[in-house]
Image (cartoon, rainbow, N blue to C red):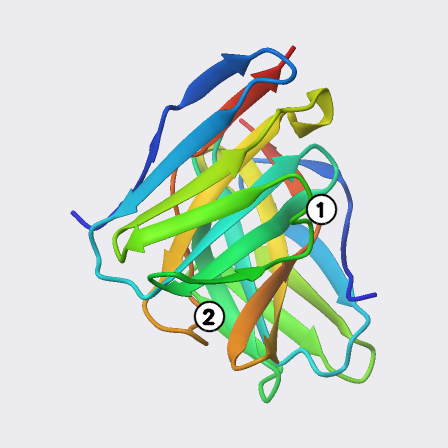
Amino acid sequence: QQQVRQSPQSLTVWEGETAILNCSYEDSTFNYFPWYQQFPGEGPALLISISSVSDKKEDGRFTIFFNKREKKLSLHITDSQPGDSATYFCAASIYQGGSAKLIFGEGTKLTVSS
Amino acid sequence: DMKVTQMPRYLIKRMGENVLLECGQDMSHETMYWYRQDPGLGLQLIYISYDVDSNSEGDIPKGYRVSRKKREHFSLILDSAKTNQTSVYFCASSLRRGDTEVFFGKGTRLTVV
């Protein structure tokens, strides 16, 4: 069973702190890992992504750390802002039947308090 | 402004009624998707469409069917809706088959009573 797991389920940090969201997967054939950000009442939107050939991807305050051996990755949000309060989904992509399919984790709800 | 549009945004249906969820995209994307989102389960793939009349089951297709007669339009149909189909349904699209960047609509909240 292809699975992507996220922890914690919910996380609260103070403004200015670093939020760390964790993700793990089972299938070693996954080769692309996007993180999606979802605000209430909206659809998920691609935030940042990493391929399995890299161990780190940075985009402003958002950084993905990837450990292929342990099948784990994490999203670090530095200098967290109240506007970062959202649900974050880790996903993994598998190329199957000539197309790429995204498998989503359960999500982490982040609250940034000011 | 490129986007995926879903109609309606909110829908209440009685058990046993038929349900039609509509989705459109203005980006000329080949591939379109239907997902459902439930608390604690993330997003689960119902169907993928690779182009007009080229549809494939996702992970949870039972109880659903789809229709894609125009590239920009993808419909999800629930024949005889059940209460366990109460969920938020998201349509999404990507430029080509195999592309990993997926664009989502705002969702349709369906309640089956």
Residue in the picture at 58% in, 80% down: A97
Bin the neighbour count of mark 1 within 10 Å (Cα to Cα): few under 14, some 14-19, many 20 and up. Answer: many
| Amino acid identity at mark 1 | Glu
Q: Is residue A32 above or below residue B70?
A: below
Where disc 2 sits, the SS reads loop
Determine which quarter of the picture holds residue B4: top left
Q: Position of residue B73 (x, y in %)?
A: 29, 48
Q: Which residue is mark 1?
A: A106
Residue in the picture at 52% in, 24% down: B18
Determine which quarter of the picture holds residue A71: bottom right
Q: Are marks 2 and 1 on the same chain?
A: no
**Which chain is home to disc 2?**
B
Count of residue discs: 2
| Amino acid identity at mark 2 | Thr
C-alpha gap between disc 2 and disc 1: 19 Å
Taking B63 as reference, is A2 left or right?
right
> CB under 8 Å between callouts 2 and 1?
no
Bin the neighbour count of mark 2 within 10 Å (Cα to Cα): few under 14, some 14-19, many 20 and up. Answer: many
Nearer to me, B12 or A51: B12
Q: Position of residue B40 (x, y in %)?
A: 75, 37
Taking B99 as reference, is B42 left or right?
right
